Structures are given as C-alpha cells and as structure tokens.
Amino acid sequence: MEQTETIYDVIVIGAGPGGMTAALYASRSNLKTLLLERGIPGGEMNNTAEVENYPGFNSILGPELAERMYESTMQFGAEHVYGDVKRIVVDGDYRIVEAGKKTYKTRAVIIATGSYHRKLGVPGEAQYNGRGVSYCAVCDGAFFKGKKLAVVGGGDSAVEEGTYLTQFADVNIVHRRDELRAQKVIQDRAFKNEKVSFTWNAIVEEIKGDGQKVTGVVIRNKNTNEITEEAVDGVFIYVGILPQSDAFLDLGITDEEGWIITNEHMETAIPGIFAIGDVRQKLLRQITTAVGDGGEAGNRAFAYIEDLHDRLAAAEAAAETVD
Ligand code: FAD
Ligand code: NAP
C-alpha cells in the first residue's frame, strides 16, 4: 500500500450529486478536500435521460446536469482523483481511506457512494446482460430503434425510463401488482403515451434468447398462474436499488439492509464519518435530497474539524502547563 503524504481535512467518497455538493461546501470553507470517484463524476445522473425536478431547469439531460455540477464543484480547489474505496480505518483522530493500492489520511470522511440496481434474479438475466438485458435506458435505448421492449418494475425508474424508451421502441411495462408506485405525474404521462402498454400482476419468470440475444420474456400471472411468453427484443430492468455500502459494513454504521444510519446532520455513529445521499437510510431518494445532504455534511465537517483543532490545541496547552 502506498500512503499519500498529504493529510486532508475531508475526503468525499463518490462524485454523484451528493458527493459533489459536499466537496463544494467543504472546499469553499477552505478545507483541504479530496473527491474520490471510481467512475465518471455524476453518479446516477449519467444514467438518467431527462431531469425535470431539479430547480433552475425546466428540463435538463442527466449527463448535462452532471457536467454542470462538476464544473461548479471544482471551482473552489477540491482535488479529484480516481479511486475505488475498499475500506475506512479509524486511527485515533485520523481516518484512513484505502482505495486500490493507495491509502489517504484525513480528519473527516463523507460517504456518498449511492446505490446500485437490484437484479431480478431470473434465468437468462445474467446470460443476456448487454445482449438485450439492460439497466440503463439512456445508455442502451438507441440500440432498439423500431423494436419491442419489456420494462420490468412499477417505480419512478421503470415508468419514467420506460416512457423515454418510446422514442425508439414500443414498450410494455411489466409490473408485479395492479398499481404503480411511481409519482403521479410520471404515471399520467405513461398512461397517455400510445407506445406504452402494461401487463399487470405479472411476474417475469425467465428471459429467453437464441443464444446470442434476447427473444422474449416468460410471464406468470400472479392471480391465475397462467404462463405466457411475449416476444421482445430487449428487457430493461428497474426493480429497485440497494445500498453501495459493502466497503463500510465492518464499521457497524449500517442497518440490516446495508443503508447507512445517520442523524439529521449526516453524522454516523463514528465521529468524523458522515454519510449522504442514496446510500443513507431515508425515505426520499432524489437529486435534490442528495444535494441537500451534501450541503449539510460539508458544513458539519467544517464544524467537526474546527472542534478537533480546538480540542488538540487545548490538549497541547494543557501538556505545556504540566511541563
Ligand atoms: P449516486 O448518484 O448514485 O452517486 C454515487 C457515486 O459514488 C457514483 O458515481 C459511484 O461511481 C461512486 N461510488 C460508489 N461506490 C464507490 C466506491 N467504493 N469508491 C469510489 N466511488 C464510489 N432523481 C431525481 O431527482 N430526478 C430524476 O429525474 C431521477 N431520475 C432517475 C432515473 C434513474 C434511472 C435512477 C436510477 C434514479 C433517478 N433519480 C432521479 C434518483 C437520483 O439519481 C439519485 O437519488 C441521486 O443520483 C443520488 O445521488 P448520490 O450522490 O447519493 O449517489
Ligand atoms: P423503487 O421505487 O424501489 O421501485 C421498484 C419497483 O420494482 C417497484 O414497483 C417494485 O414493485 C418493483 N420490484 C421490486 N422488486 C421486484 C422483483 N423482484 N420483481 C419484480 N418487481 C420488483 O425503485 P426505482 O424506481 O428504481 O427508484 C429508486 C429511487 O430513485 C426512488 O427513490 C425514486 O424516487 C428515485 N427516482 C426518482 C425519479 C424522479 O424523481 N423523476 C426517477 C427515477 C428514480 P412494488 O411496487 O410492488 O414494490
């Protein structure tokens, strides 16, 4: 392991909207700030077609919002490097962040690692991943011009991304209940769209293919147990999200599902370790809420470091008096 010499005030792990905002607030408070990201800055915004509920923009493409946030984040001197964080070690008043072969020393850490897509877990899903099975409409939608698609799920992601896909293809939203979980405005738009159809009370049992690519889905009606096979060229899966928190499970700051528990100031049970955005145990997971969490955590990290300096200075003064 190579230990970097710099001692940071704050290390932010993850450059989604939450992490970028935290880095903006921390660096604007003159804290020495490092943003560690294992992919492209922007997080889930990079996989989102259109964002209509971020104030200031009537509508903006997800990747464009990501780029704008990144630009404004970096203006106050935060450093950004590639890093896939595997562990945080608590060493007295320092927090050691391990990423690949490098370790970074810091006084405070803000975890902003977000979530990942839940898999359906049916035969054919893994085999045809990237060959008709997808978890990202904005990445893969254009491959399906003039085709027929199944979209699995009934939440915001399935219904919104399903509607987005109709610019390329006919879309059948396959949902396990007879009502959607998605926000009303998103539902209404899908119901009005002639290229969207719905299969209700439907459990996807298998994704079929010809060995090369997807050819259909096998669906069981939950009420009648009737099995049908629908011919489709692609299956987009949006059946929820899980916390991206494996690297932090040994810290004992997560609930039984792995969501990180914080108070309203984004503080975890370990002083100097904060968590924000989708990875946090909370009810509303949105860009706005991730951004709000990021502002709070950046601000709280500043207060934490000020307190730490005061405490260390007082201890030093006390030691000198004894001498
Ligand atoms: P994320 O955006 O998930 O970012 C986390 C970042 O951390 C990623 O860049 C990841 O690479 C990085 N990371 C993870 N683990 C590590 C590690 N170990 N080391 C280093 N880096 C790591 N919300 C809205 O408000 N409006 C919308 O229109 C909207 N559309 C959506 C569409 C879809 C398909 C989905 C899935 C979500 C949508 N959301 C929308 C929700 C919104 O995208 C999320 O709530 C928001 O992105 C969460 O931000 P975050 O910063 O917490 O995490
Ligand atoms: P979600 O809200 O958890 O919805 C998951 C959907 O998948 C639900 O309809 C659920 O069915 C279904 N499902 C779960 N497990 C399943 C399984 N094994 N088989 C079949 N269906 C299954 O997840 P999401 O839609 O991905 O949204 C994630 C977060 O991002 C949410 O907080 C959401 O608000 C946010 N988001 C926001 C926007 C926006 O603001 N425009 C857009 C996208 C996402 P049930 O309904 O029966 O539980």
Image (spheres, helix red, strand yellow):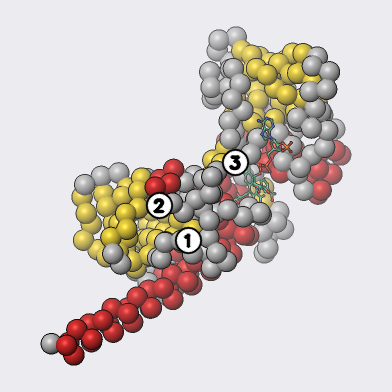
Residue 126 versus residue 239 in the image, above or below: above
Q: Amino acid at mark 3?
A: Ile
> Mark 1 sits on what residue?
268
On the rendering, which quadrant does ligand 2 occupy?
top right
User: Which is nearer the N-term, disc 1 or disc 3?
Assistant: 3
First of labels 2, 1 by sequence position: 2
At which x and y percent is residue 166?
A: 74, 33
- Image height check: is 303 above or below 189? below
Query: Is residue 64 at least partly visible in the picture?
Result: no
Disc nearer the start of the sequence (2/3): 3
Q: Amino acid at mark 1?
A: Thr
Q: Nearer the viewer, residue 73 or 33?
A: 33
Residue designated by label 3: 241
**Residue visible at 49% across and 64% down?**
267
Outermost residue, front direction?
Answer: 322
Q: Can you tell which of label 2 and label 3 is closer to the viewer? A: 2
**Label 2, on which residue?**
251
Q: Amino acid at mark 2?
A: Leu
The residue furthest top is 210
Q: Are marks 2 and 1 in contact (CB under 8 Å)?
A: yes
In percent of width and height, residue 297 lies at: 49, 66
